[in-house]
Amino acid sequence: MSFRIACLLVLLGLATSTFAQQEVTKTETSAGLTYVRANTADGMCACFSLVGVTSSFVWNANERYSGVVDVGYQRSANINSSGFNLGLATYMAGPRISFRGQKFTVFGQALAGGVRANSNSGFNIGNGFAGSAGGGVDVRITRRFSWRILQTDYMLTRVPNGSTNIQNNIRFTTGIVMRLGWMPPRGPRRPYDRPY
């Protein structure tokens, strides 16, 4: 997995030369629809899908580096026609690096936190660790709003499952981003710029 993350960082690094400076806000908030493809880590694919929502809050330290808080809930009503359901509530935080163009923003992030699992089976009930690594692309619609075309994350969860208690998940998200509180433009200070 570290090779994939390294490739993503290299790709983001190469993209910097193609991006011009964009207005940056102090904070961003987003809400979107999420699809999760889940798999246990026991070598046997008990794969199934969950659907839900994800919301995030971003504090921009500057145009490149940010802190992210991500909260989501995904649910599967009938796992592989077994009659069992599963709901996962995740809450994670971590750093983000962004490359902003006039129209597009590309970002990568790594988050860690927890997960609360709830199921009608004897397993998958309780709290555990959750972590994710991935990135996405936003396209600017207006000065205030963007559309998150796609965000893709590898998401690791550790909840009881009757086997290894480890789940390897791929998460896809699309939604709306709203920017709040503009930062002052970057550049040299001019004599007529007064701090009023």
Image (cartoon, rainbow, N blue to C red):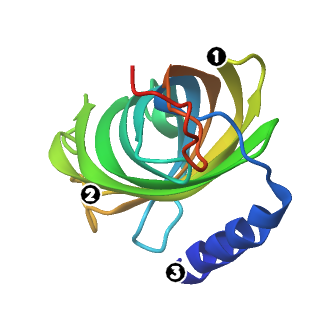
Q: Residue at x 55, y 54 (%)?
A: 64
Q: Are marks 2 and 1 in contact (CB under 8 Å)?
A: no
Secondary element under disc 3, as helix, strand or loop, is helix
Q: Residue at x 25, y 37 (%)?
A: 117
Local crowd size for mark 1, using a 10 Å CA cut-off: few (<14), some (14–19), many (≥20): some
Question: Along the polypeptide, which appears first: circle 3 or circle 2?
Answer: 3
Q: Is residue 135 above or below residue 84?
A: below
Q: Quadrant of residue 36?
A: top right
- Front residue of this view, candidates 69 and 72: 69
Question: Along the polypeptide, which appears first: circle 2 or circle 1?
Answer: 1
Q: Residue lying at the far left in this picture: please name it.
A: 126
Label placed on residue 2: 3
Residue 154 seen anywhere in this rendered image of the structure: no
Image position, residue 65 (x, y; %)? 47, 54
Local crowd size for mark 2, using a 10 Å CA cut-off: few (<14), some (14–19), many (≥20): many
Label placed on residue 144: 1
Label placed on residue 17: none
Image position, residue 28 (x, y; %)? 48, 28
Mark 1: amino acid = Arg
Mark 3: amino acid = Ser
Q: Residue lying at the far front in this picture: please name it.
A: 191
Secondary element under disc 1, as helix, strand or loop, is loop
Image position, residue 168 (x, y; %)? 45, 61
Gap in Å between the C-alphas at discs 3 and 2? 19 Å
Which circle, 3 or 2, is nearer the viewer? 3
Q: Quadrant of residue 89?
A: top left
Q: Which residue is mark 2?
A: 158
Image position, residue 139 (x, y; %)? 77, 32
Q: Is residue 72 left or right of residue 193?
A: left
- State the quadrant of the C terminus: top left
Q: Is residue 64 above or below residue 123?
A: below
